[in-house]
């Protein structure tokens, strides 16, 4: 997708970040009928952001949209398809300051749901040593429009080339688990959540949206107060000394502080917080790790999602053997803790958990 006209000045407002009220205000300012706003928004909700493809609006409005807004904040560089149906999308940013910088998003299809894993930053502000994204450094925060545009681009791709083999063909769930630490970009994440849940927009329920964080406790509190969506915590160890190394933000927000914060997070009925735990051979998969994790978990509010370590070139870590992962899960279950082993998807195209890493040097 490319925008046919560009304005090489300050950042323009992004079409994908505008709600119906915003568009109605523009229509009034541009001397256009109010109903045009709904027409434009309907196209956006289908994943169509290029005004040239909005067939029921007049040429004068198409021209005004192109010259006054950044209609397409992302440019698709490539799409890769996994043997299991997972699709990875590599996008380049179009706004001037980050022009050409690249991010990745993933569509994970199942029979009854389609989940989009979206990025919130170019690179990551944190440096968790087992995560491929964390090895590339931080280039900048994504805007709300750039976050939403990932979802819209994937919706458009699914309309153009539907899934096969009885896999779901639309976006039903969103997870903020791509590149970046979402809660280190509160402006972009909160803005995008409002758009994704807007009644005139994609109308996604907060029960179908999950924000993953490494444990920024003040930001978790603000998320719960404003947008209490599903919460996932990148835990990876319940021993402070180990978590200081695996998740360095723990040095600022240690486990007891995180524990208190999670106890207060507002949960929808029959919902739980997910504690994500990548099992690393000989690092966090020993008896003392299990015992500490069992002590940390509040089983009435949380469940543990054990994640296979997905290797990347140059990684110093190895994943725990599958049999040992299953035993770790069973040991937790025997202690009254709900635990599951996550099925790894898209590993063959480097689209699995912890593998996303786009070339931040970008393209021209």
Image (tube, rainbow, N blue to C red):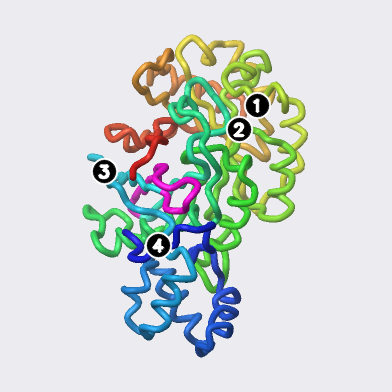
Q: Which residue is mark 1?
A: 249
What is the x, y in percent for residue 61? Answer: 42, 81
- In the image, 103 versus 305, the foreground residue is 103
Residue depicted at 52% across the width and 67% down the height: 203
The image shows a total of numbered marks equal to 4
Q: Which residue is mark 3?
A: 80
Circle nearer the N terminus (1, 4):
4
The reply to whether residue 169 is visible in this rendering is yes
Q: Which residue is mark 4?
A: 6
Report crowding for label 1: few under 14, some 14 to 19, many 20 or more residues within 10 A (C-alpha). Answer: some
Marks 3 and 4 sit apart, C-alpha to C-alpha, by 28 Å
Whether tag 3 and tag 4 are in contact, CB under 8 A, the answer is: no
Q: For the residues carrying marks 2 and 1, which lies nearer the camera in this image?
A: 1
Q: For the residues carrying marks 1 and 4, which lies nearer the camera in this image?
A: 4
Circle nearer the N terminus (3, 1):
3
Marks 3 and 1 sit apart, C-alpha to C-alpha, by 32 Å
- In the image, 225 versus 252, the foreground residue is 252
Disc number for residue 214: 2
Circle nearer the N terminus (2, 1):
2
């Amino acid at each position: 997708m490319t925008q046919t006209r560009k304005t090489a000045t300050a950042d323009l407002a992004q079409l994908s970040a505008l709600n119906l009220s915003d568009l109605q205000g523009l229509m009034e300012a541009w001397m256009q009928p109010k109903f045009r706003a709904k027409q434009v928004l309907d196209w956006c909700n289908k994943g169509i952001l290029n005004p040239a493809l909005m067939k029921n609006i007049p040429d004068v409005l198409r021209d005004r949209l192109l010259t006054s807004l950044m209609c397409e904040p992302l440019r698709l560089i490539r799409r890769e398809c996994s043997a299991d149906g997972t699709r990875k999308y590599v996008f380049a940013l179009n706004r001037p300051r980050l022009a050409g910088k690249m991010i990745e998003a993933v569509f994970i299809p199942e029979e009854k749901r389609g989940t989009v894993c979206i990025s919130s930053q170019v690179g990551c502000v944190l440096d968790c040593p087992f995560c491929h994204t964390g090895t590339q450094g931080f280039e900048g925060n994504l805007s709300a429009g750039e976050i939403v545009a990932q979802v819209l681009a994937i919706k458009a791709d699914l309309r153009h080339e539907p899934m096969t083999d009885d896999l779901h063909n639309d976006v039903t769930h969103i997870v903020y688990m791509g590149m970046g630490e979402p809660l280190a970009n509160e402006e972009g994440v909160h803005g995008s959540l409002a758009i994704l849940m807007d009644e005139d927009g994609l109308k996604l329920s907060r029960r179908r949206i999950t924000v993953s964080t490494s444990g920024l406790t003040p930001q978790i509190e603000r998320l719960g107060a404003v947008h209490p969506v599903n919460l996932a915590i990148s835990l990876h160890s319940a021993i402070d000394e180990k978590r200081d190394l695996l998740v360095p933000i723990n040095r600022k927000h240690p486990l007891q502080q995180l524990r208190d914060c999670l106890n207060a997070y507002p949960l929808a009925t029959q919902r739980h917080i997910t504690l994500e735990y990548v099992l690393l051979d000989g690092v966090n998969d020993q008896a003392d790790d299990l015992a500490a994790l069992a002590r940390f978990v509040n089983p009435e509010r949380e469940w543990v999602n054990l994640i296979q370590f997905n290797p990347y070139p140059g990684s110093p870590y190895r994943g725990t053997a599958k049999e040992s992962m299953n035993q770790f899960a069973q040991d937790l279950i025997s202690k009254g803790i709900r635990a599951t082993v996550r099925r790894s998807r898209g590993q063959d195209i480097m689209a699995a958990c912890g593998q996303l890493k786009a070339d931040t040097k970008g393209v021209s």
